[in-house]
Amino acid sequence: VLTPGFNTQLVPKGTEPRTFEDLLDPKWKGKIAVASIPVPASAPGFVGVVLAHMGEEKGMDYLRKLARQNVVDVGIAAGRPIVDLLIAGEHAVALQIFHHHAATSAAQGAPVHWIAMQPAFANLQTSSLLEKAPHPNAGKLLIDFLVSREAQAIFRDANYIPVDPEVPLRDPSLRPNEKDLKVIWFSPEEIERSMGRWTQIYKDLFR
């Protein structure tokens, strides 16, 4: 799940932007960072969730307004690296971080927290077996293990979201639901089909 996050030393809890509209507040001008490579955990992914949530016309209007906030492009620092920049105090707020990265670091005492800005971008991960794999049965055994209760507990212990609903999370707030953390699920096919356009919109508006 990809959400914004913030440095809790620069932005005391309770004062962080909690909605898309909050990000347009002048006080955040120049204080919002985002990676820009063409992956979901980056600016194009944020563009995608805005358009899916608001629709084409309202979404584009919102993105034009957000671009006037002088959002800081941190280049290829997508995923874990941009969370590390937040922790280091390089930026106050970051868009499109994996929320479990922030949760893991916060549990270890780092000054970072994720924001349940709704809806969030939910990136569906898949495991596949190659059609002409040299050892297909070994691949099947690996996939069976990945979805087993044992492996799902390993994922849980690393603060990933288990696909097995019977495996409880260490931090239940990380699991999407229809109340506290609403998400839009994007399939791998939809991401592949749309990523080029989302990237171009980001380049046209924010650079």
Image: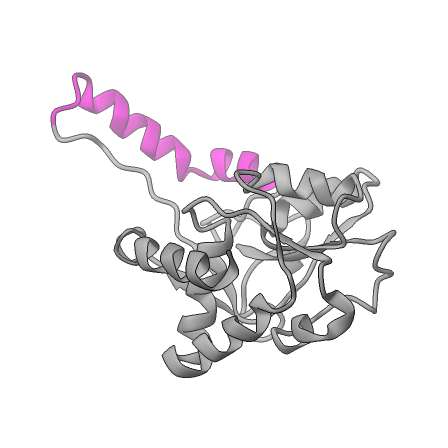
The magenta stretch spans residue 141: yes
Question: In the displayed structure, does residue 112 sit left or right of residue 119?
Answer: right
Q: Quadrant of residue 67?
A: bottom right
Question: In the displayed structure, does residue 126 sit left or right of residue 129?
Answer: right
Q: Position of residue 192 (x, y in %)?
A: 28, 51
Q: Position of residue 125 (x, y in %)?
A: 39, 46
- Relative to 136, is 66 above or below? below
Region rendered in magenta: 132-157
The magenta stretch spans residue 18: no
- Please tell me which residue lies in front, 91 or 70: 70
Q: Position of residue 174 (x, y in %)?
A: 62, 56
Residue 11 showing in the rendered view: yes
Q: Main secondary structure of the magenta part?
A: helix
Question: In the image, what residue occupies the spot 59% across and 75% down?
Answer: 179
Residue 157 showing in the rendered view: no
Q: Position of residue 127 (x, y in %)?
A: 32, 38
- Relative to 85, is 136 above or below? above
Q: Residue furthest bottom?
A: 58
Q: Residue furthest top?
A: 134
- Please tell me which residue lies in front, 98 or 66: 66
